[in-house]
Image (cartoon, rainbow, N blue to C red):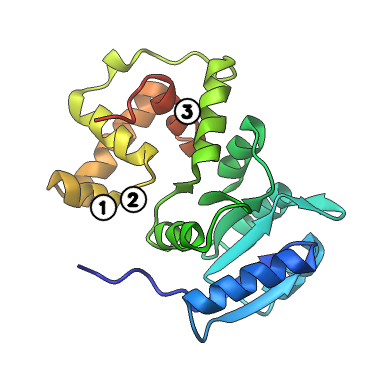
Amino acid sequence: MTSPPLLRSALLVDDHPFVRDGLRAALQRLYPGIRIEEVGTASDALRTLASFTPQLALLDVNLPGGNGLDLAREIRQRHRKVRLLMVAGETDPWTVSEALEAGAAGFLLKTHSQDALAQAITAILGGATFLCPEAKEALAQAEQRGSERLMPAPAILSDREREVLRYLAHGENTKTIASLLQVSPKTIETHRMHITRKLGTNSVAALVRYALRHGLTRP
């Protein structure tokens, strides 16, 4: 069994010092020796990133003079190697969807435990997408409200494509799916290309919502 990815550096972006204190303490317990930089605004985050490239940036959704969603988009454009985890006080369908569209690899409520934070970081550093249960539920609500544009019925997908989509919706990366299905990563990429072409979207958020809506997240 391989060890979980080691987090060596992180940027905390939250305007509440006590939230940053809690996150910093949790990260230091989980990853002794980690380098952590912390700021309270989006503009300070961008200035920090000019001289510091962390493995992971933890972003609050609501920030003074802006928001974490716009910051996520900016970071994805300027610093593509930095993985992004949105850390929010509450969820709603629009925010979760926009966070994924902005390039966030994960969404976690601040009310969750240190163990959940560790799970999120392990998934994200491994190349997967992590959504806490509340974020998944928010996306399911978006489907129930009919916010997603009309897509073809699941019958358009082959059995293997539905299987790949199920793993994608659970946040598994290409390498992991390939191992689980005992095929090559290139084969999984081909299946994913066919899925996005048939459904008319390559949006991670849209694929997750589609899988939830049609019950494709269950074996």
Using the rendered view, name the quadrant where residue 58 is placed: bottom right
Relative side of 188 to 88, left or right: left
Type of amino acid at the residue the image marks with label 1:
Thr
Q: Is residue 133 left or right of residue 122?
A: right
Specify which label sits upstream in the sequence, 1 or 3. Answer: 1
Determine the image quadrant of residue 211.
top left
Residue 38: give its label.
none
Give residue 173's mark.
Answer: 2
The x, y position of residue 53, in whole percent, is 59, 74
Label 2, secondary structure: give it. loop
Asked which secondary structure carries label 1, the reply is helix
Return the mark for residue 176.
Answer: 1
| Residue 46 x %, y % | 73, 67
The C terminus lies in quadrant: top left
The quarter of the image holding the N terminus is: bottom left
Q: Residue at x 55, y 38 (%)?
A: 134
* Closer-to-camera residue (167/80): 167
Task: Give the quadrant of residue 43.
Answer: bottom right
- Mark 3, residue position: 209
Q: Are marks 2 and 1 in contact (CB under 8 Å)?
A: yes
> Dot 1, how many residues are within 10 Å of its Cα: few (below 14), some (14-19), or many (20+)?
some
Q: CA distance from mark 1 to mark 3?
A: 21 Å
**Gap in Å between the C-alphas at discs 2 and 1?**
5 Å
Residue 62 in view (yes/no):
yes
